[in-house]
């Protein structure tokens, strides 16, 4: 079943329902159309579609510096925009969700039934420091045998003191996993840039996008930032 049919009334979801963001109002219907346009552009020279092609996983930084973005609704608005990616790429019609600071936690999958108030329902808040390695290790274990997997890894700061561990994890990452790092905020993200160009790997299994203010980006810009490098990886893997 295609994305457009999935979003119709069979699950009792009004696809025209608007979701209020901090700066404007975005409907799920408009987001899915934006995603379809982005995918057409990204795959026009590729011998593949993205229908049901991969598990979709969100790893969300909830360290202390993310507190304002969570409390003011910006993070929920971002989840609303990301939801169609799970419906398009994942045959389970969901996005697996983890949060991390210096620990990591897995939550229930994000679906059409629960996405619109996901942050509030799961009482997600921000606290603690930032450690990429605890999250990366968990992903490597949980998705080792899961087929193609797109991990959307969103953080607003550099990891603390575990850079060499992170590099080792990325070099040994199972070949079915691709991680798209998205750096938000004012950090320079030099370490994420290093991971994106890391040597000693059989395949280029990471991407990096710096989105200084992702919450002001259009859905099309977010989709392109999230999927562009994954499309290339999934074609050659």
Image: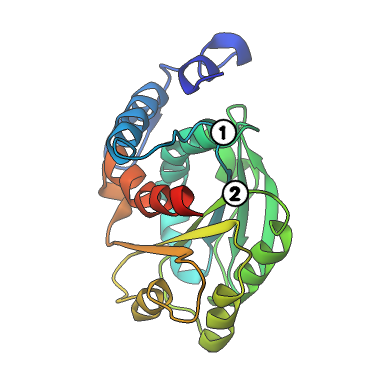
Assess disc 1: are there few (<14), some (14-19) or many (≥20) residues with their C-alpha within 10 Å of its C-alpha: some
Q: Is residue 200 above or below residue 7?
A: below
Q: Is residue 217 above or below residue 64?
A: above
Q: Position of residue 103 (x, y in %)?
A: 66, 71
At horizontal 34% and vertical 30% (from top left) the residue drawn is: 26
At horizontal 69% and vertical 55% (from top left) the residue drawn is: 106
> In screen coordinates, is 1 left or right of 16?
right
At horizontal 65% and vertical 46% (from top left) the residue drawn is: 122
> In screen coordinates, is 112 left or right of 81?
right
Helix, strand or loop for disc 2: loop
- Front-most of 74 and 237? 237
* Label 1 with label 2: CB-CB less than 8 Å: no
Q: Badge 1 is on which residue?
A: 52
Q: Position of residue 197 (x, y in %)?
A: 37, 75
At horizontal 43% and vertical 19% (from top left) the residue drawn is: 17
Q: Badge 2 is on which residue?
A: 148
> In screen coordinates, is 173 left or right of 230?
right
Assess disc 2: are there few (<14), some (14-19) or many (≥20) residues with their C-alpha within 10 Å of its C-alpha: many
């Amino acid at each position: 079943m295609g994305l457009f049919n999935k979003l119709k009334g069979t699950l009792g979801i009004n696809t025209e329902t608007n979701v209020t963001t901090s700066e404007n109002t975005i409907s799920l219907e408009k987001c899915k159309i934006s995603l379809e346009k982005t995918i057409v552009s990204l795959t026009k020279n590729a011998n593949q579609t993205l229908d049901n092609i991969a598990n979709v996983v969100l790893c969300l930084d909830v360290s202390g510096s993310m507190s304002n973005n969570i409390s003011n609704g910006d993070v929920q608005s971002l989840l609303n925009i990301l939801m169609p990616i799970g419906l398009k790429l994942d045959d389970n019609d969901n996005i697996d969700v983890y949060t991390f600071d210096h620990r990591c936690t897995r939550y229930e999958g994000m679906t059409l039934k629960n996405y619109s108030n996901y942050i509030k329902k799961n009482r997600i808040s921000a606290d603690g420091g930032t450690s990429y390695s605890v999250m990366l290790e968990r992903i490597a274990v949980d998705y080792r045998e899961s087929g193609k997997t797109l991990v959307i890894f969103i953080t607003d700061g550099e990891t603390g003191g575990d850079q060499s561990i992170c590099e080792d994890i990325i070099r040994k990452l199972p070949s079915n996993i691709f991680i798209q790092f998205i750096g938000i905020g004012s950090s320079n993200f030099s370490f994420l840039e290093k991971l994106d160009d890391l040597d000693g790997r059989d395949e280029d299994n990471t991407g990096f996008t710096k989105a200084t203010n992702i919450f002001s980006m259009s859905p099309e810009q977010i989709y392109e930032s999230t999927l562009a490098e994954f499309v290339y990886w999934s074609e050659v893997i």
